[in-house]
Image (spheres, rainbow, N blue to C red):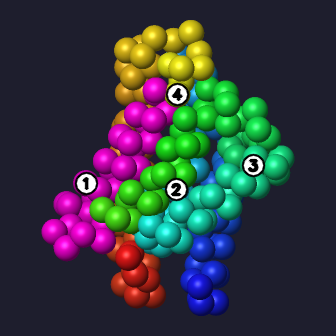
């Protein structure tokens, strides 16, 4: 990677970590809080593309795995990856790759199609992976896990719109490629 790409990747990783400093908002209906870090995950895919976006997210998750408190609420360590929120973290790792690929397709050339890719991957895909994992590691049924995750959709939809708007502006200013 070129120096510029390394700096951009590092800045997105740092952004994800900074967003983790915003305290999580517990919902009470499931053991997964509302966090702002997923906005950074979506930014990684939208701004950096598949490869570098995944590297940025993997860097943050690696830091969390070895014990640095970089996840929302200061969470860290291997237990986070096998607990109720583990599925969301695995979804985060896959999201930039899928999002970057989707955004690089020639037919994804309009604002609505770009927003759809960001929303489908950054919100629905991550929530689906998180819901399935939550069902597997907790006493919550799959149906209840999926239904309880509907609480995240409105806020995450607003985050995906913000990511689209930021990505369009940043790309116009810096000509960052999403491929």
- Which of these two is toward me, 64 or 36? 64
Q: Secondary structure at mark 1?
A: helix
Tell me residue 39's x, y (percent).
50, 54
Q: Is residue 158 visible?
A: no
Q: Residue at point 45% right, 19% down?
A: 145
Tell me: residue 19, above or below residue 11: above
Tell me residue 73's x, y (percent).
73, 40
What whole-number distance in Å separates the C-alpha atoms at marks 2 and 4?
A: 19 Å
Q: Residue at point 76% right, 55% down?
A: 63
Q: Which mark is residue 133?
A: 4
Tell me: residue 141, above or below residue 163: above
Q: Inspect the magenta stretch and tell me whether residue 117 lies in it.
A: yes
Which residue has dot 2 on it?
A: 41
Which residue has dot 3 on it?
A: 64
Can you tell which of label 2 and label 3 is closer to the viewer?
3
What whole-number distance in Å separates the C-alpha atoms at marks 1 and 3?
A: 30 Å
Badge 3 density bin: few <14, some 14–19, many ≥20, Cα 10 Å: many
**Who comes first in sequence, dot 4 or dot 1?**
1
Tell me residue 101's x, y (percent).
35, 65
The C terminus - image quarter: bottom left
Q: How many callouts does the rendering have? A: 4
Magenta-highlighted residues = 103-132
Which residue has dot 1 on it?
A: 116
Q: Are marks 2 and 3 in contact (CB under 8 Å)?
A: no
- Which of these two is toward me, 105 or 45? 105
What whole-number distance in Å separates the C-alpha atoms at marks 2 and 3?
A: 15 Å
**Who comes first in sequence, dot 1 or dot 3?**
3
**Image quarter of residue 123:** top left
146 on left or right of 9: left
125 on left or right of 62: left
């Amino acid at each position: 990677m070129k120096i510029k790409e390394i700096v951009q990747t590092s800045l997105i990783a740092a952004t994800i970590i900074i967003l983790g400093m915003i305290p999580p908002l517990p919902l009470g209906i499931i053991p997964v809080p509302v966090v702002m870090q997923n906005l950074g995950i979506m930014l990684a895919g939208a701004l950096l593309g598949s490869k570098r976006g995944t590297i940025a997210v993997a860097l943050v998750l690696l830091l969390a795995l070895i014990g640095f408190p970089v996840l929302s609420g200061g969470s860290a360590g291997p237990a986070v990856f096998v607990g109720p929120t583990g599925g969301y973290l695995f979804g985060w790792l896959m999201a930039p790759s899928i999002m970057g690929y989707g955004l690089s397709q020639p037919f994804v050339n309009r604002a609505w199609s770009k927003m759809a890719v960001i929303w489908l991957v950054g919100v629905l895909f991550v929530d689906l992976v998180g819901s399935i994992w939550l069902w597997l590691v907790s006493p919550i049924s799959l149906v209840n896990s999926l239904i309880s995750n509907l609480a995240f959709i409105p806020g995450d939809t607003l985050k995906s719109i913000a990511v689209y708007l930021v990505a369009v502006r940043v790309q116009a200013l810096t000509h960052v490629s999403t491929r």
